[in-house]
Image: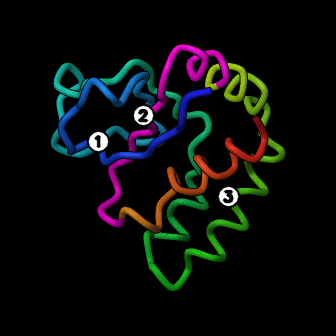
């Protein structure tokens, strides 16, 4: 099976990215929809609006955010659809989760990637 990668939506698309899924609830600022090379926008698996606002990308809150976001993922109505999609696409090649946050280590895509890998 191929691998899951994460990448900022603002970084250039590469062939090795494979299937590209935007995983943020909000569209990345400053990027026109036609300019973002992506195959799908799966905003339903993004953190809830309340959790996203409470986290506010504060580094000191990341452990708390990760725990709460994993709780949301475990109870999410779309989790089986998400896992089926990713598994199907991984059979064909890599999958890249796109996010807009500036912090490449402390964001929702990091948590979603880890959670997805643990549940496949």
Callout 3: SS: helix
**Tag in front: 1 or 3:** 1
Label 1, label 3: how many angstroms apart (C-alpha)?
A: 21 Å
Residue 82 x, y percent position in the rendering: 67, 28
Name of the residue lying farthest toward the right:
75
Determine whether the residue tagged by mark 2 lies in a helix, strand or loop. strand
**For the point 43% across and 46% down, which residue is it?**
6
Q: Indicate which disc, 1 or 2, sits on the residue closer to the N terminus.
A: 1
**Which residue is drawn at the image coordinates 53% and 29% (left, top)?**
42
How dense is the environment of label 2, judged by Cα within 10 Å: few (below 14), some, or many (20 and up)? many
Q: Dot 1 surroundings within 10 Å: few (below 14), some, or many (20 or more)?
A: many
Which residues are drawn in magenta? 87-103
Question: Mark 3 or mark 1, which is nearer the start of the sequence?
Answer: 1
The correct choice, above or below, for 52 with respect to 81 in the image is below
Q: CA distance from mark 3 to mark 2?
A: 17 Å
Q: Which residue is mark 3?
A: 69
Q: Does residue 119 appear left or right of residue 48 in this picture?
A: right
x and y percentages locating residue 13 in the rendered image: 23, 31
Q: Mark 1 = which residue? A: 9
Task: Identify the disc placed on residue 22.
Answer: 2
Above or below, comparing residue 40 to residue 67 in the picture = above
Colour scheme of the rendered structure: rainbow
* 82 in the magenta segment: no
| Residue 88 magenta | yes
* Residue at mark 1 to residue at mark 2: CA–CA distance: 8 Å
* Mark 3 vs 2, N-terminal side: 2
Screen quadrant of the C terminus: top right
């Amino acid at each position: 099976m191929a691998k899951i990668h994460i990448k900022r939506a603002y970084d250039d698309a590469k062939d090795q990215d494979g299937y590209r899924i935007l995983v943020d609830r909000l569209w990345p600022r400053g990027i026109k929809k036609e300019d973002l090379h992506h195959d799908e926008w799966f905003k339903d698996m993004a953190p809830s609006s309340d959790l996203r606002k409470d986290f506010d990308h504060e580094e000191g809150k990341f452990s708390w955010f990760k725990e709460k976001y994993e709780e949301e993922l475990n109870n999410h109505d779309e989790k089986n659809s998400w896992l089926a999609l990713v598994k199907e696409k991984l059979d064909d090649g890599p999958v890249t989760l796109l996010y807009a946050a500036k912090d490449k280590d402390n964001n929702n895509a990091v948590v979603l990637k880890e959670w997805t890998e643990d549940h496949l």
